[in-house]
Image (tube, rainbow, N blue to C red):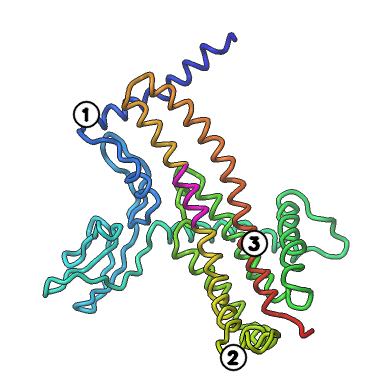
């Protein structure tokens, strides 16, 4: 009981700046638009916002690389020095558009290093920093070497768990070795990306796997692995399955149509599952963060009550998102391995 006063004082010291922020927003004449704030943080951008201090935004400018559809020239600049023919279109989530001579607006070829692209390169560097030391240790080991310990031992345990307990039984004994590098890369890319995305400050906080383009690319890679390297028994099961003739040929080829439709629905399910889960998790956490400021804008009583509730929920959600980060990487890898294994059927 003697520490209750100290706890209350610390909470007041923590939340009073939030009250000032909310009051400042109210004096500025604008209401707190939670959906707009959430969507802004989830969207991609051409600069990396770090913080806002005394009304000024502190951001890292990222290189914009666009090709003019009118002149064919390439332009390299930043968001603050975008040439006149180009502009940021708010109706299309701030993407760059070009205004042509006839007044039409077109989307130029855009190879810019956006916030999501920069986050992916950070993830790549983290993966290199993790796995190169492990590779050096295994390169130097010999028959007399002891089992690895510390960080290398922990990584070996995680890698062998995914390799032996997930990839090997799902793909099959005959073919798992050729797919293990891809599936392990996918697992650790999604896991590390999700975990870095939970860090609220730079260089984290970017919802990479909550972007439909990223999950689409991962799903297409799995689709290629399934259909390009699938054996003849796999394609036979699609176009001429072992079912009664009236189901696969006359009068309508029902089963081949269904099986061919499944070729596209499997990677689509992978794409939507990862995208929806990660975007929803980030959106909920951002919403509870905004509730803190919303409470202070309604008064001290609401501020204290909603602030305490939101902090507890944010702690719970962050712990839950750590679990979801692993589960989504595991599920995507497992389903990819299962679908790849189904593409290597043996003739019965």
Question: Marks 1 and 3: which is nearer the front?
Answer: 1
Residue 212 place in picture, x, y as percent: 45, 62
Mark found first going from the N terminus, 1 or 3: 1
Q: Magenta span covers which residues?
A: 276-284
Identify the image quadrant of the C terminus. Answer: bottom right
Residue 114, given in percent of the width and then of the height, sits at: 37, 60
Magenta segment main secondary structure? helix
Q: Quick check: marks 1 and 3 in contact, CB under 8 Å? A: no
Asked if 129 appears above or below 104 in the picture, the reply is above
The residue sitting at the right extreme is 144
Which residue is identified by label 2?
Answer: 250
Depth order, front residue of 103/55: 103
Residue topped by disc 1 = 27
Q: Which residue: 53% across, 75% down?
A: 264
The alpha-carbon separation of the residues under discs 2 and 1 comes to 73 Å
Q: Going by the picture, which residue comes out furthest to the top?
A: 2
Question: Taking 82 as reference, is 194 left or right?
Answer: right
Label 1 residue SS: helix
Crowding at mark 1 (Cα within 10 Å: few <14, some 14-19, many 20+): few
Q: Residue 132 carries which label?
A: 3
Which of the 4 image quarters holds residue 57? top left
Give neighbour class at mark 3: few <14, some 14-19, many 20+ (Cα, 10 Å): few
| Image quarter in which the N terminus is found | top right
State the residue at coordinates (56%, 90%).
251
First in residue order: circle 2 vs circle 3: 3
């Amino acid at each position: 009981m003697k520490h209750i006063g100290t706890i209350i004082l610390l909470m007041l010291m923590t939340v009073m700046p939030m009250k000032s922020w909310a009051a400042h927003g109210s004096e500025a004449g604008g209401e707190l638009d939670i959906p707009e704030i959430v969507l802004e943080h989830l969207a991609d951008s051409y600069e990396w916002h770090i913080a806002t201090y005394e009304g000024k935004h502190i951001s890292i400018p990222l290189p914009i690389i666009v090709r003019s559809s009118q002149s064919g020239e390439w332009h390299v600049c930043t968001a603050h020095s975008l040439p006149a023919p180009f502009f940021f279109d708010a109706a299309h989530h701030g993407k760059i558009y070009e205004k042509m001579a006839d007044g039409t607006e077109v989307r130029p070829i855009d190879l810019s290093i956006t916030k999501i692209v920069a986050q992916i390169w950070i993830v790549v560097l983290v993966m290199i920093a993790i796995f190169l030391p492990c590779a050096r240790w295994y390169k130097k080991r010999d028959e007399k070497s002891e089992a690895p310990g510390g960080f290398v031992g922990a990584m070996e345990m995680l890698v062998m768990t995914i390799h032996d307990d997930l990839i090997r039984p799902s793909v099959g004994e005959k073919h798992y070795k050729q797919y293990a590098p891809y599936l392990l890369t996918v697992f650790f890319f999604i896991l590390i990306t999700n975990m870095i995305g939970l860090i609220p400050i730079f260089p984290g906080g970017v919802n990479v796997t909550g972007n439909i383009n990223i999950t689409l690319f991962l799903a297409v890679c799995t689709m290629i692995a399934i259909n390009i390297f699938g054996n003849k028994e796999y394609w036979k099961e699609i176009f001429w399955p072992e079912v009664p003739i009236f189901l696969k040929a006359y009068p309508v080829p029902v089963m081949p149509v269904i099986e061919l439709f499944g070729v596209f629905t499997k990677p689509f399910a992978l794409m939507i599952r990862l995208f929806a889960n990660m975007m929803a998790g980030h959106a909920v956490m951002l919403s509870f963060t905004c509730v803190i400021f919303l409470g202070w804008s309604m008064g001290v009583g609401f501020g204290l009550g909603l602030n305490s509730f939101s902090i507890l929920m944010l702690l719970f959600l962050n712990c839950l998102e750590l679990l979801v980060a692993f589960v989504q990487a595991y599920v995507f890898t497992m389903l990819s391995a299962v679908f790849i294994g189904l593409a290597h059927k043996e003739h019965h």
